[in-house]
Amino acid sequence: MSASFPASRLSRLRKSPAMRQMFAENSLRVSDFIVPLFVVPGSGVKKEISSMPGQYHFSLDMLSEEVKRLGDQGLNNLLLFGIPENKDPEGMVACDQNGIVQQAARTLRENCPSAVLIADLCFCEYTTHGYCGVMDGDRLDHDVTRKNLGTQAISLARSGVDIVAPSGMIDGMVGQIRSDLDAEKFQDVAIMSYSVKYASAWYGPFRDAVESAPDSGDRKSHQMNAANSREALREAKQDIAEGADCLIVKPALSFLDIIYSLKQETDLPVIAYNVSGEYSMIKAAGKLGLADEKELAIETLTSIKRSGADLIISYFASQLASKFL
Ligand code: PBG
Ligand code: ZN
């Protein structure tokens, strides 16, 4: 038992910046972060995304330069998203060997060999209707989509990615991708599963950035209900049984309890996705002069780390890198 007041004065250890740092239980490091990047067709493009100030669309020729700049900051973990030239109802351009992310992966593999390349695996950026796969009437067909995800994974593995990150919450996706990758001798390509992805309004700015908002309806029939936490554990355990190497919880801030419970209940690395709406909300608050943007960002990212995340996918990484260890 520790002493009580007045022998105990908890403010003693908070006296100076040096002492506060000495007794900090958690801290952010550059190596904690995964940086999302948006790749578009064309050349000479570095265009700010209007819904996400400070984030850009990059064409292939501009991408390596950006990735080298991130590398100089110590940021080596990259999550690639592509916006294709043409979309189709099944989104099969996502599996094209000359697709936008496949090209980006090959370019980066060559120009930036030390970067860890992670490819988001889904079809919503590639379908004309904006749903995450092949539709059967107004329902997503999980069985056809699951098989297509295996094909998308193989094509990205061939292009040199280290990790695939299936983000559609399609039933059985991890097992399918694992066996398809292994059958093609890509047994060393890891799967970072979006195991616990909630149907969330916090994805708004991202859907604008990649033009993937569904024509009508929503993703509530495959993404999780924000009311549920025990179901999150079932999702995580199922992905583990199917061969996932690490688990994503997404979004982060409304789901810190889920991050905490996955950290307690599983022994895989837990990754939190600090999503577009969480980013843009803080940017907007800063712009309106309601609060200090950088301090808000550091506080929220620290709360994600404190809740148990081993890694954080965040749009803030580069802007704040000088403030991390
Ligand atoms: C694609 C995907 C989404 C995000 C990452 N991968 C969008 C969605 O499900 O609508 C969201 C990322 C963000 O909001 O920052 N399935
Ligand atoms: Zn999707």
Image (tube, rainbow, N blue to C red):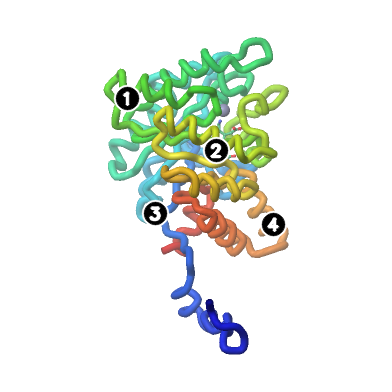
Badge 3 is on which residue?
31
Indicate left or right for 88 with 18 as reference.
Answer: right
Foreground: disc 4 or disc 3? 3
Q: Nearer the viewer, residue 278 or 47?
A: 278
Alpha carbons under labels 4 and 1: distance apart: 42 Å
Residue drawn at x 61%, y 38% as measured from the top left:
230
Badge 2 density bin: few <14, some 14–19, many ≥20, Cα 10 Å = some
Residue 7 in view: yes
Toward the bottom, the furthest residue is 6
Query: Image quadrant of residue 285?
Result: bottom right
Looking at the rendered structure, the kind of residue marked 4 is: Ala
Marks 3 & 1, CB-CB < 8 Å contact: no
Image quadrant of ligand 1? top right
Badge 1 is on which residue?
158
Looking at the rendered structure, the kind of residue marked 1 is: Arg
Marks 1 & 2, CB-CB < 8 Å contact: no
Badge 4 is on which residue?
285
Task: Say if disc 2 is inside 8 Å of ligand 1.
Answer: no
Judging from the image, what secondary structure is the residue with disc 4 in? Answer: helix
Foreground: disc 2 or disc 4? 2
Query: From what the image shows, is residue 299 above or below residue 191?
Result: below
Indicate left or right for 270 with 97 as reference.
Answer: right
Query: From what the image shows, is residue 115 above or below residue 283?
Result: above
Badge 2 is on which residue?
233
Judging from the image, what secondary structure is the residue with disc 1 in? Answer: helix
